[in-house]
């Protein structure tokens, strides 16, 4: 089982939305997938509670029981576990990152977000984990998205698929769905599919060597 952690100490980066979308895409790709929400706000849990289907499976956990709960999920034969994290709670994020096979860091292409990403990178590097960046919520044809990709590439791998700002990402989450479940042929669905392929490939590469 591969553990994928969505992490960013900057609020509003889109962790929860991407976590739900990637989880659904992994299920669509034929995998057995579980989700855990470690954010006290419980946004991922609230989204899942609105879903009609039971997949991906949601696992109720807490920081104190997380390691044990992960072993239960692993022993149940799941292929992937995606974990959403809270913003700005350093110790909580570090505890979760330490258990990851891959850390996905969503970053909006703005100067403020790019300045804030360093703290998350430091945590991931301290834990010696593999990470990839995802440019999320980009505006069409905005040069800053290219500039952001160049800046982020100094720290690690950047997904070549940019996730653009579209209302279907947020609106679909209201009733427990994802953009690709609303319209599998939409641009958003295509982006999520490509993003999942990229994340899947990097998650299978294993841990970073010292």
Image (cartoon, rainbow, N blue to C red):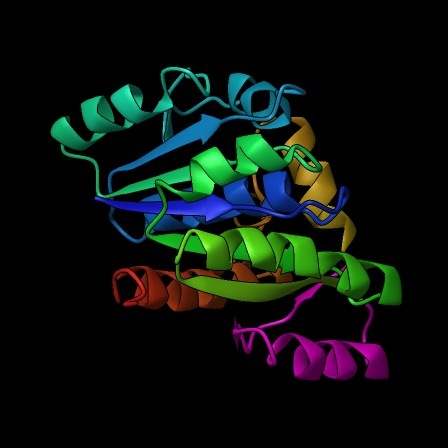
Q: Is residue 142 visible?
A: no
Between residue 143 and residue 130, name the one nearer to us. 130
Q: How many marks?
A: 0
Between residue 105 and residue 210, name the one nearer to us. 210
User: How far from the left and from the top, in percent, is residue 83?
Assistant: 45, 36
Stretch in magenta? 139-165
Eyeballing the image, is 152 above or below 8?
below
Residue at horizontal 68%, vertical 37%?
A: 87
Give residue 93's quadrant in the image.
top right
User: How far from the left and from the top, in percent, is residue 107?
Assistant: 69, 60
Residue at horizontal 12%, vertical 28%?
A: 75
Magenta span contains residue 152: yes
Between residue 168 and residue 94, name the one nearer to us. 94
Task: Please give left or right for residue 83 compared with residue 180 in the image.
Answer: left
Give residue 182's quadrant in the image.
top right
Magenta span contains residue 176: no
Q: Quadrant of the N terminus?
A: top left
Give residue 165's quadrant in the image.
bottom right
Between residue 119 and residue 185, name the one nearer to us. 119
Eyeballing the image, is 210 above or below 27?
below
User: How far from the left and from the top, in percent, is residue 98?
Assistant: 39, 42
Task: Please give left or right for residue 87 compared with residue 99 in the image.
Answer: right
Task: Please give left or right for residue 165 compared with residue 79 in the image.
Answer: right
User: How far from the left and from the top, in percent, is residue 138?
Assistant: 77, 66
Q: Quadrant of the C terminus?
A: bottom left
Residue at horizontal 41%, vertical 40%?
A: 82
Residue at horizontal 77%, vertical 44%?
A: 12
Eyeballing the image, is 180 above or below 141?
above
Q: Is residue 186 visible?
A: yes
Task: Please give left or right for residue 27 compared with residue 196 in the image.
Answer: left
């Amino acid at each position: 089982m591969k553990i994928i952690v969505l992490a960013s100490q900057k609020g509003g980066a889109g962790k929860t939305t991407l976590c739900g979308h990637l989880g659904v895409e992994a299920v669509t790709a034929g995998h057995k997938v579980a989700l855990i929400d470690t954010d006290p706000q419980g946004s991922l849990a609230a989204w899942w509670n609105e879903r009609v289907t039971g997949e991906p499976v949601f696992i109720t956990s807490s920081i104190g029981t997380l390691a044990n709960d992960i072993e239960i999920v692993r022993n149940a034969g799941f292929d992937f576990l995606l974990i959403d994290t809270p913003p700005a709670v350093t110790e909580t994020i570090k505890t979760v990152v330490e258990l990851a096979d891959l850390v996905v860091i969503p970053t909006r292409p703005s100067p403020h977000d790019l300045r804030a990403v360093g703290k998350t990178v430091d945590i991931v590097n301290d834990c010696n984990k593999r990470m990839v960046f995802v440019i999320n919520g980009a505006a069409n044809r905005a040069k800053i998205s290219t500039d952001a990709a160049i800046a982020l590439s100094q720290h690690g791998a950047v997904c070549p698929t940019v996730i653009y700002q579209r209302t279907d990402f947020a609106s679909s989450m209201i009733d427990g769905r994802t953009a690709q479940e609303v319209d599998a042929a939409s641009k958003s669905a295509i982006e999520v599919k490509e993003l999942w392929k990229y994340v899947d490939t990097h998650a299978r590469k294993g841990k970073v060597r010292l």
